[in-house]
Image (tube, grey):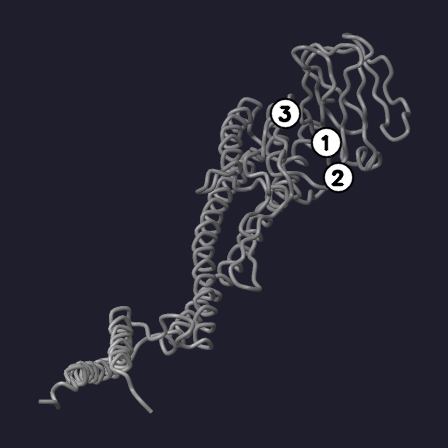
Amino acid sequence: MRISTQQLFDRGLQQIQDVTAQQQKTQLQLATGKKVLTPADDPVASTRILELNQELVLNNQFQRNIELVDGSLKYQDNTLGGINDVVQRIRELTVSAGNGTFSAEDLNSIAAEIDERLDQLAGLLNSKDASGGFMFAGYQGNTQPFQLNTSGAYEYEADEGKRFVQIDASVSIVSTSNGKDIFQDVASVKNTFFTVANASNQANPPAQITVGQVIDQDLYDAFYPEDLTIVFNSATDFNVTETSTGRTILANAPYQSNQAIVVNGVQFEVAGSPIAGDSFTVESTQKQGLLTTVEKFVYGLQNFDDSDVGRDSFNDLLATTIANLDNAETSILEARGQIGARLNAIETTDEQLKDVEILTQEILTGLESVDYAEAVSLLSVQQFTLQAAYSSYAQITSISLFDRLG
């Protein structure tokens, strides 16, 4: 078999190129610290490295989620603590109002401070989180949850949703609380009611209805759970009917703005100049929101009747208010307890994620990190091999038939 000069050149050059490529690969491994540079180097290891890197990215995202929800929950807990402090102060004022020697003027002074505390309480219930959304608004973070209605009483205007944040592949945590659960759906110790102005009323400015109070619990309990509807026949008279049946309770009753309307054990007032067709409802309920409890007590203080019957009614209101404030405090404490449980779950999950991250990094290092001692030794061998290839190539290419003739 004949070997041409060109073949000798090609074979020698190919050998040099192969060794050079191997050397460059080793140098790149040393520079990057990775031994698997392309999927072709180790297809199995490359697939596993890709999976591990994806797991680390997901793990890091979960840890960022935990950091965000942890801060949010701690902020909520701090806000609930502030709300509870205000409720306790209102309770102290309520207890002090039970002093039998206080006059109507004294009670009005207490009402003025509680009214200030009511505004403070509403501000806390409408607190915003770090992202600028309302903390207790459910899904509707851009909707102020507690708003004054046309009658000047607070109503819950958001929804009952709860936002979740995923903190692990199979774990999601509640990151928000809705104000309806905590502050609105509070059990009342006795049957009570709330008043509503019909949104379709045409008077301009709209007439208002006060929050009112139960002045005869036994009489109201006998009527409960029926509702009342007040419909104005004209600007000077109105009818009161039982909502479910339409039965007339008061017919053509004379109207005077801010004059007490007493029916079936409840008292309330309509203020303003309603027109024919305007209507209001008194709706029965076994729940009473925190703000409504405070509003009703302020109403009772401002409308104190210094008679034996009036004092009995006020004492009943006093006891009911204290009990309802205690129920509200219990609801707040339960909400804080739930937040504490979530914070514990977050802490445990965070520790697990960090342990998984460490383990994943160790496995990843074993798969892709270069052994520097081995690589440096291999590079030395490759350098020696390359030098030998150059030397052999030089000697082979210098051989000529003309050197043998002469």
Q: Which residue is mark 2?
A: 191
| Drawn side of residue 283 relative to residue 305, left or right | right
Q: Are marks 1 and 2 in contact (CB under 8 Å)?
A: yes
Q: CA distance from mark 3 to mark 1?
A: 21 Å
- On the image, the x and y values in percent for residue 72 come to 47, 49
| Residue at the image position 73 percent from the left and 30 percent from the top | 215
Nearest the eye: 305 or 208: 208
Give the quarter of the figure containing the C terminus. bottom left
Q: CA distance from mark 1 to mark 2?
A: 9 Å
| Residue at the image position 39 percent from the left and 70 percent from the top | 38
Mark before the other along the chain sequence, 1 or 2: 2
Mark seen at residue 202: none
Q: Which residue is mark 3?
A: 149
- On the image, the x and y values in percent for residue 294 come to 59, 34
Mark seen at residue 214: 1
| Amino acid type, residue under disc 1 in the picture | Val
Q: Is residue 267 above or below residue 27?
A: above
